[in-house]
Each structure stands twice: as structure tokens, then as C-alpha cells.
Amino acid sequence: MITLMASRSSRLCARALALLAISLALVASPARAQSESELRQRAADVVAVIAGEKPYAEVFADSFVMAVPEAQFAMIGRQLTAQVGALVGLDAVEPGAQRGAATVSIRFERAIVRGPMQLEGSAPYRVAGLLLNDLAPVNERGLSVVEQVQDLPGETALLFARLDGSEVIAAHNADRQFAIGSTFKLYVLSALSRSIARGERRWEDVVNLTERSFPSGQMQDWPRGSPVTLHTLATLMISISDNTATDQLMAVLGREAVEAELVASGHSAPAATLPYLTTRELFLLKLGDDSTLAQYEAGNEAQRRAILAGLQDRQLDMADIQRVFGPGPRFIGVEWFASAEDIARIYARLAQDPVALEILGVNLGMDRQRFSGWAYAGYKGGSEPGVLNFSWLLRDAAGQWWVLAMSWNNPAAPVSEMEFLALAQAALAQRERR
């Protein structure tokens, strides 16, 4: 079985973001163990295929080729180079204990992508399995994680600290406001959690689906009127960043309830995010003309609400989806905003609700093994061209709560999800070394 591991960061735009890994089921190899030189040659062949210098079917086993067609593999290679720079070459090969197994490291301009490779059990010993799921930023200058984050083009922020502020591992621009994409859905989840805690609603309450937005997600394709529980809506909103589920929850709760939660959480600059947009409204705004977007960005809350009122009768055309973000960053000042410290504050509220914690733990944004040293991990992230946020809620073995929140905004160019994820992994590893 072959799976393409696309980024699960919560994202608004429906365009396919660059894949973070190629995950292929490893095939057991009962034959003789290949020598280190043979393993290295096959690893070099994989690099040659990515570079377009060697025939695909000559390097990969038939079962692999059937599951991942050559065109699909070529697309993955293009996306890798788009995210972490030009292919440099094979970096290292470490033979494994299993026959025909090795761990390979492939170097790109800005990151080393690493993982296990498995060869066939008989001649010609082609590649039957490959899992490139480990990222490490290239750090030739010996910079710290904070310095590497600071070195990125555009504006960045990082906070890795206990929620109570008693220990800080890394901090950079932690009090500054950044566009956060679908990480805004944390406030919707928290507003729902508070409503349930007050006895106004229950997780198992059923509502009929009335809203429709662009993907990400799947509920935009569900029949109108479908009965669905609040728990299901919340889980889809967080785990796959379903925009229609988000807008449905906002319709149930009311915009005012989410805005009230934004303020109650201790958000340091709520005015930048008011009125609290639905995803449909954001899409409609960005499909509109530049003058309206400029007016909305510069307007006060009352002026913005008037602009939104004029959008209510407009319809979304799914054919327009590429037109929203296809050309690159578009008015990233029309967004939802929070600082890393604000995200820590909303996580502190969500940490009080065991159901919300279960929902946040469905999709961790990267390999679960990365969090094996933590008693709990939850995640939400967001993106659009020029906007990226990763935010994890973590609990250590002693029961202390932590946050790792990272933002990257660049109005001039798209930002690299893969490169930023590598820095997140480096930050997590930094604490493990303490």
C-alpha cells in the first residue's frame, strides 16, 4: 500500500500544498542482505530519478510503480524542490538490520530529507519501499533554531514555553500579531466548549448542514440538510480543517459568541480580527476587487461589518477556487490574527476540556513518533500563500502544559511549509536534548 503524506496543517486554501513526505509500505525481504555499496547505489538511483536522470521503472519495483505512477512521483519531486530548494544529492546511507534495508538521507538546498528504504528480495534488487518522513534544516552556519527562524524571508515568530510562562525554551516576536490562517478555528472550538460547559448545548446535539464553503475539507460536498453532531463538526474542523464545518459551527454559535471568546481568552489585539470572518466571507473578499479588499483592510470594525453585509447574497463558485490564491499572496492583511502568546492563552482555555483535547489530538501535523516523549500532544495550524502557522499544545510527563507556536508571514512570496516544519522538528528536538 502506498500513501502520499500531504501536510495536515490546518489550511484554508484548497490548492494542494507541497507534500511533506513520501510514505510507502516497506516490503519484507527474505533474500540475502545487500552490501553497503549496493544499498548506496540504489539510494543514488533514487536521487537520480528525482533529478530526472534515470528511468523510474529501472529503479523501483513493479509493485511500487503500480501504486505510485511515474507522473505522480515526478510531481512529488517537483513539490519537494519547490519547498526546500534544489536537489543537491545523496547525503548518507546507513545500512539497517533487516535484509535489504537502509536509512537514506537526501540533501536539498535548505533541508535534508531522511527515512528508511527497502529493496526487493531478489535480483535486480529494486526499491520496494521508501519513507521520507524526517526533515532537518540545513544549518551550515550553526545557527540556533531561533536564529534560523529569524533568517527566513518575511516576518516570523516563535514561542516554545510552558503555558504558565515559568520556562521558555525559545522565543522570538512572541507578542507580535501575525496572520494565522485556519489556526483561528481554535477560537471557534473554544467558544463551542464554553457553550457546552454552560449547559447551552451538548456535543451530541444534531444540526442540519446549511453552510457551504470552499475546501479544505469535505463537507462542502455533503448533501444540504445532512444531520450532523456538533462533535463531528468540531472534529472535522480541527482534524482536516474543514471550512464548511467551521462555518456551520459559527452559524450555530453566532458570530458574537466567537468574538466574545476571542476577547475572553485575553487576546492582546482583538480589533485586528473583528468582525470575526467565516471562511466563506474570507473567500468572497479575496475573490473581489482590490479596492474592496483595501477598504476592508484599512477600515474600522463598523466599516468592515458593512462590507460583509454586502457579501451575504453572493454565491461561491467552486470553479473560482484557484483564482483565490493561485497567483500567490493576496492581501494577507485581510485574515485572522494572533500572537504566539495569544495562541498560548487560547490553548490554556482548551486544556480545561477533555473532549476538546481529544479533538485536538486527532491530527498532530507530523509523525506521531515525534511526540513519543510527551504525555499529550494536540495541534492546529493554518496557511494560505504568504501565511503559515503551526501551533502545538503539549503536556509533559510531570503534567506541565507547554505550547510550541510558530508563525511566518510574507506578503511578497509563498512560504515553505516543509522548511518551517523542519524547524518545528528542530525545536522539539532542542527540548529533548536539555
Image (spheres, rainbow, N blue to C red):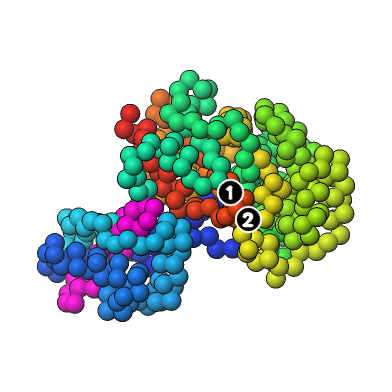
Whole-Å distance between the Cαs marked 1 and 2?
8 Å
Residue corresponding to mark 2:
329
Disc 1 + disc 2, Cβ < 8 Å: yes
Residue 176 position in % (x across, y down): 61, 33
Residue 251 position in % (x across, y down): 77, 48
Q: Tell me the residue at 77%/57% (across/down).
A: 290
Relative height, residue 77 to residue 279 (above, below): below
Say if residue 226 shows up in the picture: yes
Q: In the picture provided, is 131 more to the left or to the right than 294? A: left
The amino acid type found where label 2 is placed reads Pro
- Count neighbours of disc 2 (C-alpha within 10 A) and say few if under 14, some if 14 to 19, many if 20 or more: some
- Say which of 326 and 427 sits in front: 326
Q: In the picture provided, is 311 more to the left or to the right than 47? A: right
What segment carries the magenta color? 106-131
The amino acid type found where label 1 is placed reads Asn
- Which tag, 1 or 2, sits closer to the chain's start? 2
Relative height, residue 204 to residue 61 (above, below): above
Residue 410, which numbered label?
1
Q: Is residue 318 magenta?
A: no
Say if residue 261 shows up in the picture: no
Q: Secondary structure at mark 2?
A: loop
